[in-house]
Image (cartoon, helix red, strand yellow):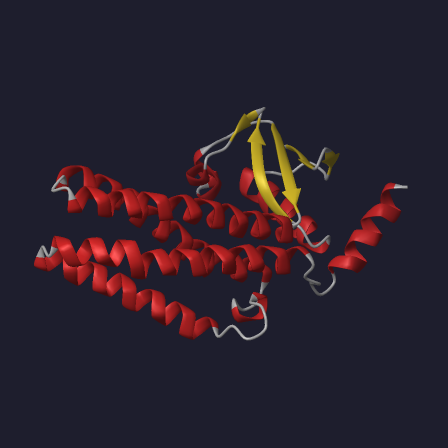
Amino acid sequence: MKTYLDQREIGPQPTLAAALETARRQAADLGRVVVEVKLDGVDLTDEQIDQPGTVAGERVECISADPRALVAMSFEQAAEALDEARAIQQEAAGALQAGQTDQAFGLLAEAVGVWEAVRKVLDQAPVLLGVSPQSLCPAGTIFQQTTAELSASRSALKATLAMQDWATLADLLNVELDQQAEVWTGLLGQMGQAVRVLALPGVGESESKAKGGAA
C-alpha cells in the first residue's frame, strides 16, 4: 500500500495496520496525532481503523494535527454546548412548573446528553496531552472539588427524578444545575485557552525539525 502522511509519502506498507502504525509513529515524532485516515480516497470509520484487517486498498492517506488544537477545540465546543444547555435546563424547569412533563423530559434528556459529553471531554482530552485536568485550570481552582460538587448536583437530579418530585426538580434545574452550568462553561473556556499556550515536551523541537526538513 502506498502510504502518505500529510500528503508526504512515507513508503509502501504491506498492510493497513502497518500503514497506520508507521503514520502514527512519524506523526508522534513531530508532536502530532493522526486524526483522519482515507483509504483509496474514502474516509475510514473508527471501527475500520480499530480493525484494519477488515479492509483492503491501495492508497492510505493520513492527516495529522497538533493535539493541543484538538483538545482546545474540544474544551471550547463543550463550553458552548453547555452554555446552550443552561437555556434548555431552564426551559425544562418551566415545562415542569406548567405540568408539561413529557416536554420537560425531552428537554432534560437533551441537557443530560450535553453533561455526558462534557464528562467525556474532561476524561479523555487531558490524557491525549499527557497532562492532568488540574494543570489546565486557572489558579485557585481545585478541580477535584469542582467535579465533586457537580457529581453531587447530578446525584440530586437522579434522586429527585426517582421520587418524581417535579417541584424540587424544577428548582434544581433553575438554581443548582444552572449555577453548575455557569461554573463549567467558564472553566472549560479557560481550560481551552490554557491548552492553546501549553508547552508539550519535544513539540517545539519537532516542529522546528519539520520546518527545516521541508525547506
Q: Quadrant of the N terminus?
A: top right
| Image side of residue 43 versus residue 203, left or right | left
Q: Whole-percent x and y of residue 153?
A: 28, 64
Figure check: 172 above or below 33: below
| Residue furthest top in the image | 41
Q: Whole-percent x and y of residue 10?
A: 72, 40
Q: Whole-percent x and y of residue 136?
A: 58, 65
Q: Residue at x 22, y 44 (%)?
A: 94
For residue 105, which quarter of the picture? Answer: top left
Q: Nearer the viewer, residue 152 or 5?
A: 152
Q: Residue at x 69, y 59 (%)?
A: 197
| Image side of residue 30 versus residue 89, left or right | right
For residue 48, which quarter of the picture? Answer: top left
Q: Nearer the viewer, residue 178 or 164?
A: 178
Q: Residue at x 14, y 55 (%)?
A: 167
Q: Nearer the viewer, residue 21 or 172?
A: 172
From this viewpoint, is residue 15 visible? no
Count all numbered tags in the image, as a single digit.
0
| Residue furthest right in the image | 215
Q: Whole-percent x and y of residue 109?
A: 25, 44
For residue 54, which quarter of the picture? Answer: top left
From this viewpoint, is residue 95 visible? yes
Q: Residue at x 15, y 42 (%)?
A: 98
Figure check: 11 above or below 132: above
Q: Quadrant of the C terminus?
A: top right
